[in-house]
Image (cartoon, rainbow, N blue to C red):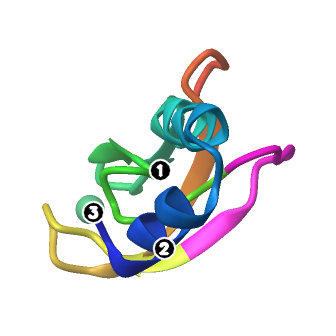
Amino acid sequence: MSFTQRFFTAILPKRWAEDMRAESLAWMMRCPCGFERSVWEMGGIRWKARGNPKRLITCPKCGQRTWHSVYRSTQTPP
Ligand SMILES: [Zn+2]
């Protein structure tokens, strides 16, 4: 877990922390190269959130700093 994840897991009630983790795992980040991984696996948290933002991060697969689409895994990728 990243520092942020450990911090929130420590301060939140267990049930909320589990909900936060489950929801962060359901949100995916997708690189234009096709690589995708959940927000939680990338060390982030996305909880009680809506919309499809873009995040400028370095892709672990292609090594490029690209705009990743964030979408819920239950939606079709944009
Ligand atoms: Zn990539």
Q: Quadrant of ligand 1?
A: bottom left
Left or right, 61 with reference to 71: left
Q: Quadrant of residue 15?
A: top right
Image coordinates of residue 68 in percent, x first then y, are 50, 62
Residue at mark 2 to residue at mark 1: CA–CA distance: 22 Å
Mark 2 Cα shell of 10 Å, populated few (<14), some (14-19), many (≥20): few
* Residue corresponding to mark 3: 1
- The answer to whether marks 3 and 1 mark residues whose Cβ atoms lie closer than 8 Å is no
* Identity, as a three-letter code, of the amino acid under mark 2: Phe
Left or right, 15 with reference to 57: right
Q: Residue placed at 46% from the left, 52% from the top?
A: 39
* Residue corresponding to mark 2: 7
- Residues shaded magenta: 47-55
Prevailing SS of the magenta stretch: loop
Mark 3 Cα shell of 10 Å, populated few (<14), some (14-19), many (≥20): few
Q: Is residue 62 magenta?
A: no
Left or right, 23 with reference to 6: right
Residue 44 visible in rendering:
no
Q: Residue placed at 52% from the left, 34% from the top?
A: 18
Residue at mark 3 to residue at mark 1: CA–CA distance: 17 Å
- The answer to whether 36 is drawn above or below residue 46 in the figure is above
* Identity, as a three-letter code, of the amino acid under mark 1: Met
* Residue corresponding to mark 1: 29
Residue at mark 3 to residue at mark 2: CA–CA distance: 10 Å
Residue 30 visible in rendering:
yes
Question: Mark 3: which secondary structure?
Answer: loop
Q: How many marks?
A: 3
Which-is-in-front pick, marks 2 and 1? 2
- The answer to whether 15 is drawn above or below residue 56 in the figure is above
Which-is-in-front pick, marks 3 and 2? 2
Q: Quadrant of the C terminus?
A: top right
Q: Residue placed at 74% from the left, 60% from the top?
A: 53
